[in-house]
Amino acid sequence: MQGDIVKAHGDFRLMVNVIGTRPVRQIDIIRNQQFLHVVQPMKKEVSFTYIDNQPQPGDSYYYVRVIQVDDQMAWSSPIWVTR
């Protein structure tokens, strides 16, 4: 959940569910200020799972940024992961 602090052993899976007020132009997965994954669904409702296949040791944080076609944006609260 948003804001969680978790310990991960191995791959980290991030389940993303977005419901926009307009079609979603872009969804970004970000770890420690580095863009890891970009999706451009052009739909109002989007669900997918992202697996970080190159996790970093120690503490990392992940968050999701959403941009709609009308340029409205939203960000998730970070999820803190310790490996």
Image: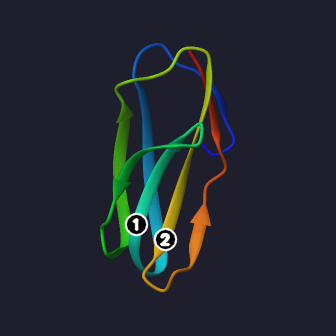
| Of the pair 33 and 79, the residue shown nearer to us | 33
- Please state if 75 lies on the left or on the right of 26 as rendered: right
Asked if residue 40 is positioned above or below residue 10 in the image, the reply reads below
As shown in the figure, which amino acid type bears the numbered disc 1?
Gln
Q: Position of residue 72 (x, y in %)?
A: 56, 79
Query: Could you say which disc has been placed on residue 53 in the image?
Result: none
Residue at 50% across / 20% down in the picture?
56
Asked if residue 40 is positioned above or below residue 76 in the image, the reply reads below
Query: Could you say which disc has been placed on residue 26 in the image?
Result: 1
Q: Position of residue 57 (x, y in %)?
A: 54, 14
Q: Position of residue 2 (x, y in %)?
A: 63, 46
| Distance CA(mark 1)–CA(mark 2) | 5 Å
How many callouts does the rendering have?
2
Instruction: In the displayed orientation, state which residue is furthest to the front.
Output: 34
| Discs 1, 2 touching: Cβ within 8 Å | yes
| Helix, strand or loop at mark 1 | strand
For mark 1, does the 10 Å Cα neighbourhood hold few (<14), some (14 to 19), or many (20 or more) residues? some
| Of the pair 28 and 43, the residue shown nearer to us | 28
Image quadrant assignment for residue 17:
bottom left
- Please state if 37 lies on the left or on the right of 64 as rendered: left
Image quadrant assignment for residue 61:
top right
Provide the residue designation for mark 2. Answer: 67
The quadrant of the picture occupied by the C terminus is: top right
| Helix, strand or loop at mark 2 | strand
Residue at 36% across / 64% down in the picture?
46
Residue at 51% across / 45% down in the picture?
30
Among the two numbered marks 1 and 2 on one chain, the one whose residue lies closer to the N terminus: 1
Asked if residue 58 is positioned above or below residue 22 in the image, the reply reads above
For mark 2, does the 10 Å Cα neighbourhood hold few (<14), some (14 to 19), or many (20 or more) residues? some
As shown in the figure, which amino acid type bears the numbered disc 2?
Ile
Image quadrant assignment for residue 49:
top left
The quadrant of the picture occupied by the N terminus is: top right
